Structure formats: C-alpha cells, structure tokens
Amino acid sequence: MEAKEMERIIRTAENWLNPSYDEETRAAVRCMLDAEDKTELIDSFYRTLEFGTGGLRGIMGPGTNRMNKYIVAQATQGFANYLNKVAAEGGFTTMKKGERVSVVVGHDCRNNGRMFAETVADVFAANGIRVYLFESLRPTPEVSFAIRHLHCQGGVNVTASHNPKEYNGYKAYWEDGSQVLQPHDQGIIDEVSKVRPEDVRTGGDRNLIEIIGGETDYDYMMAVRSVMIDQDVILRQKDLNIVYTPLHGTGRQIVPMCLRSWGFANIHVVPEQMVIDGNFPTVVSPNPENSEAMTLGMRMGTRINADLVIASDPDADRIAIVVRNDRNEWVIINGNQTCMMYCHYIINNMKRLGKMRDDMYLVKTIVTSEMIRRIADREGVTLTDEYTGFKWIANRIRMWEGKRKYIGGGEESFGFLPYDAVRDKCSPSSICLICEIAAYAKDHGMSLYEYLLNIYTEYGFQREAMVNIVRPGKTGADEIRQMMVNYRRNPPEEIAGERVACIKDYQSLVRKDRKEGKWVESAMEMALGATSNVLQFFTEGGLKVSVRPSGTEPKIKFYFEIPGTMRGKDDYERATAEAEARIPAIRASLGIAG
C-alpha cells in the first residue's frame, strides 16, 4: 500500500479517538493503531461502508468500513433527510398535507441488533419523524407488513439475513413496504453520502417513538391466514407431522402461531435452535439453503417420523423444505422446485375450488425456472418475469395494484410471497402454504416428494444447477467485468453441442433471435425501463443459461436450466443424473471448465 494511502487511513482512524466515540470503540481503535500488523486497521478504515440500493451490510466492529452504531446513525440521518425532503414535496401517497412522516423500525436476532434498531429510532425521532419500534425481534416480512398496515412512509429492518454471525445489516423500505427502488434508492444514497459524523441528530423527542408488538403480530397472523386456499383439506389432515426450526431466529414464535391458526395441530420444534442467539451455535452458517443447517431438524424428523421438515432463516424471509423420497431418505427441495410447487398448487387448486379469476397473475424472476412458465402457459394464467430480487416482484404488484390480482411470486433462492399484504419474501405464509400442499398430497395418498414428481410427469422435466465463480479483490472485479464484456462481444454459437437460438441482454434490453441463419434483433421491455447486467442464452434444444455478476459478493453466477426426459415418477433419478452429466460440457462451452 502506498504511504499516502496509509497515512490517510491512520488519520481517519485517529479521528475515532475523540470523545464523541465511546470508550470501548476508542480502545479497540487504539489497539488497531498500535498493532504491528495493520491488516485489521486497513480493512476497518480504508473506506466508508457503502450504502447501496438495499441499504447496508457488513462485518460488525469499529471503523468506517464496519457495521456499528455510528455508521448506522449516519445512514439513518441521510435516510431521514430524504424522507423529509420527499414529504415536503408532497411525494408520498400515504400522507396528507401537514402530517408527520412515520416509519417502522425492526431487527432480527443478530448481535447488536437491538442497539442498532434503537439508534435508528433515536435518529429518526431527532429529525421529527414518528417511529413505530417493535418491542423485540421480528421477521422481515412483518416489518414490511407493518409499514403498509400503519400507513407509514418508510421503514428500516436491522438484519443481515442469512449471512454469517460476524455480519449485520440495514434494509431500507419505502411506503409500499418494499425495499427501495429507483429513483428513491439513488436519492437516499446521495443524501447518505453527504452526511458527516457531526451532522447526525440524536436525542429527539421520545414521545415520537411508539413501541409496537402483540397487536401487530395478531394482525400479521390474520393476514397470513388469508393465504389459505383449502381449509377442508387441512381439517382432514390437521395431524400432518411437521418439524420446524427457526435457526435461532425471528420465526421462533410467529411461525408456530401461524401454523396453529391454519388448523395444524402436530407441530414439533427443534429445541436447540429455538434459542435466540446471534452466534448461531448449532450451525456453521444460518442459511437454510445449506444442508448442514438442516441436520438437527432432519434428525428430529427421523425420530418422530415427520412428514416434512421446514426451516426459516434468521430474519424469517427465506425458507427451506426437506421431504422424504421414495427410499424414505430426507432430501432438500431446491428453490426452483419450491417455487414450482407453490405455483402449481395455487393455480390448480384455486381452479378446482372455483376461486381463479382472469385478472389473477403470478410472478417469477428472470433466473427462476422456466418450468413455472410452462405450467402457467398451459393453464392459461398470466406470469411475468422480473429482475432478481423481491423488490422487483413488489414493483410489479405496485404497478398492477387495483388492475390485476397478485396470487404468488418467487425466486430460485428459496423465497416466495403468496399474497400482497407483504412486499418481501415471507416465510411464515410460505411455510403455512407448503404445509397445506403437503396436507393435500397426503389427502390424495402422496408424499410431498411424490407431488413434486407428478408435476414433472405432467409438465415435463428439467434440472436446475448453479455455478459460482469467485474472484475476490479489485483484480477479481476487473476479471468479472471483462468476462461479461467478452460474452457480449463473442457470445457462444453453441452450448453443450446445441446451437444457441436466442440471446437476451438485459443491459441493452435487446433480444436476438436466430431466424433462417441470421440474428434478428428486437427490443425488450422491463419494469421502469430498468436495466441489469444479465445475459441469457437459449439453445434450440431447450437449454437455458443465465449469467449474472453478484451485486454483493465477489463472484459471477451461472444459472443452468437443463431439460430432460421423464416418463414417470420412477424415472426422476435417471433424468436428474443425465441432466447433471451435461454440466461439464456446458461449463466448457462457456469457458468456465473446472
């Protein structure tokens, strides 16, 4: 590192030794300054933790590049400035002239979560904003629900979702209960970037902070109950044997409550993981996508002969579902399969019960399984494709509110939203609905696994897979950027022996189709005219490849959708193996062999 840069970092750190910072923080900074190895000092102070389109996320600790109460306060000051600015311009639909801006503030189970949430509430109040502060930890979807339910203009949830225990974060929400989208995302970022430590207002009127809890929980639980499609099948199968784990997080109370409100009476929880603990002592990582995190749940499921095992992540927006296969082994249903089962059940059972209307629609993200489109098209139900991230699903709901009826949407990363009272992933409602689907399957002599295989048998088979190429640091970021440039300049002519028939570029919003040996271009339309650095290749044989650099991690992601032939339920494992055997050839065609 250059001497000038090191001097700047040291000066920045020394500023944190002044009395405006607490003694614990000052002592930690002194240790970093005095240490012979300056690695921790550099990483803690070389930049200011960036407030991005989703808010903040970082490792906790002292420093400008860390999650701590000082950085949280600065971010909140910028958010408060923007909220008050929009209010002054009459830019909120949920406010009448002369009303005070109001927000909801929540947090999950992570270390320092309560302190950060109280810091957020204090700064908002000091800026004349009314705050509804949850009394204790609550799920992310309940914060989203409360913003709409209480007619607020924004909100903050202190969470780092399913990241490791060292992390915490800050999600910013807008008046419709969704994470902030353009142009407000950039407006908030601009305001946050202007805030200096001395600009932060604290010590506001405590009367502006109202503690909320039980009543909101009840209203949220009733909203979740509205998702139910077939109460009769639940009454017949109320003893469905369910194991649930919150992975030490916020689903601990609300998920069992919601399941009971639906009529399920045989609910078992994993006791070791019902303990609220931001250190997540029973798992390597609190991510329900990882099979390791489901070990204790599966162990209990085996012991009590459960029908299914379900988990939510620490902030209870994502889910994981584990079912028994035909050999009585536990298998995790992947995110694409989960979304596919939800959409199939919603369509077919609402039709069966006469609840389906022509104005109803479903949503998926562009990297989520095309199996869902196959189902929707065959059943005559509208399905839209949106960018990755639930804020884009929420945006579609907002665009069509009052015109069409949303009945479900999801993405491949273990998230689903079956109603519009919430505008983010919602595990409590999704968990209740998957238990209804399992009850329906059992009522028809099937396991949930067999229900999944029946969908493949009826609508066709494909296998999804993901490859992540990690390239850390600046050189890695440059390499990833160049990879996307190369794919655009020299797109593959064929992938795994199949000719590429269509290319979609969401950065230029141009689609290319091969017709009579020539490429024919056409424009694509996406919500808000927004673009995204995503490429998709479709082959003549039905293979789909999506390429997307991660927005939060030093990696580039490749999503494969590999079609296959499945003639019956007994054919699933063979079809899966044949599809997976094609992955090396797909990787080689894309230049990512290894």
Image: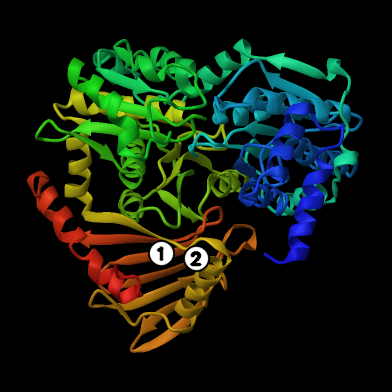
Quarter of the C terminus within the rendering: bottom left
Q: Position of residue 192 (x, y in %)?
A: 79, 47
Q: Is residue 217 above or below residue 530?
A: above
306 left or right of 318 in image: left
- CA separation, marks 1 and 2? 7 Å
Residue 534, labelled with which disc?
Answer: 2
x then y, percent, for residue 207 = 85, 15
* Image position of 55 with respect to 564: above or below: above
- Horizontal and vertical percent position of residue 542: 27, 67
The circle on residue 585 is none
Kindly indicate whether the residue at mark 2 contacts the one at mark 1 (C-beta within 8 angstroms). Answer: yes
Picture coordinates of residue 431 (x, y %)?
39, 27
Residue count near mark 1 (Cα–Cα under 10 Å), binned few <14, some 14–19, many ≥20: many
Write down the quadrant of residue 121 in the picture.
top right
Q: Residue at x 33, y 77 (%)?
A: 500
Question: Residue at image x 45%, y 13%?
Answer: 257
Side of 573 relative to 228 (left or right) = left
Query: Quick check: 492 above or below 416?
Result: below
Residue 24 or 400: which is nearer the viewer?
24
What is the three-letter code of the residue carrying label 2? Val
Residue 90 appears left or right of 330: right
